[in-house]
């Protein structure tokens, strides 16, 4: 299955022809395989280019190679958590402008502030609403269009 290959190999990217995503490159980072598969399929069906990573270390490597416009990053990752991933991406010139979205089950003010301090642009609480995710991706797309 194409989605399974994308999980095991961070270099696999699928492009969709649907104009909804406008070619926006999205890095999807979560250690829950089913979440990555389902959200990845949904994003691809909307025209986004998607690359998946199952760990923080893999996410940093994929971001350097893929240069995503947006990174949807789970905060609770093994070895290198989402906060550390965000700080690393913000520290590198090639990924500094990536629109970073924290994905988490945590909704406390402390977590939101920690995410903001780490460099995240937005904080989204799981389970994700498709409408909320689409709104954040549209915001990121608008920002990418003004920078480009």
Image: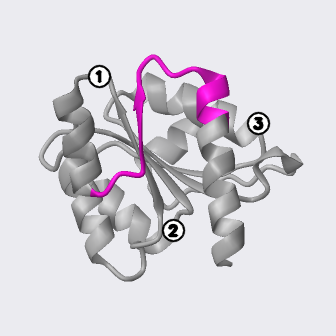
Q: Is residue 57 left or right of residue 129?
A: left
Judge by depth and name the residue closer to the eye, 61 or 87.
87
Residue under the point 59% across and 41% down = 136
The answer to which quarter of the image holds residue 104 is top left
Residue labelled with disc 2: 66
Q: Residues within 10 Å of mark 1 (few under 14, many from 20)?
A: few
Mark 3 packing: few (<14 Cα in 10 Å), some, or many (20+)? Answer: some
Side of 145 where 36 appears, left or right: left
- Span highlighted in magenta in the image: 119-134
Q: Are marks 3 and 1 in contact (CB under 8 Å)?
A: no
Give the foreground label among 2 and 1: 1
Asked which quadrant contains residue 85, the reply is bottom left
Disc 2 to disc 1, how far (Cα)? 29 Å
Residue at screen point 22% across, 53% down:
117
- Residue 57 in sight here: no
Q: Which residue is mark 3?
A: 45
Considering only vertical position in the picture, is 66 above or below 93?
above
Residue 90, position as x, y percentages in the image: 31, 69
Secondary structure beneath dot 2 equals: helix
Q: Which residue is mark 1?
A: 107
Secondary element under disc 1, as helix, strand or loop, is loop
Q: How crowded is the residue under tag 2: few (<14 C-alpha within 10 Å), some, or many (20+)?
A: many
């Amino acid at each position: 299955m194409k989605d399974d290959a994308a999980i095991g190999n961070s270099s696999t990217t699928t492009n969709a022809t649907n104009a909804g995503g406008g070619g926006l490159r999205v890095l999807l980072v979560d250690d829950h395989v089913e979440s990555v598969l389902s959200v990845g399929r949904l994003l691809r069906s909307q025209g986004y280019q998607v690359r998946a990573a199952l760990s923080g270390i893999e996410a940093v490597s994929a971001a350097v190679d893929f240069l995503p416009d947006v990174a949807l990053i789970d905060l609770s990752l093994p070895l290198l958590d989402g906060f550390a991933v965000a700080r690393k991406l913000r520290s590198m010139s090639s990924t500094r402008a990536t629109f970073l979205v924290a994905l988490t089950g945590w909704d406390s003010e402390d977590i939101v502030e920690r995410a903001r301090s780490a460099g995240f642009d937005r904080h989204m609480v799981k389970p994700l609403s498709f409408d909320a995710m689409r709104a954040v991706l549209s915001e990121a797309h608008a920002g990418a269009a003004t920078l480009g």
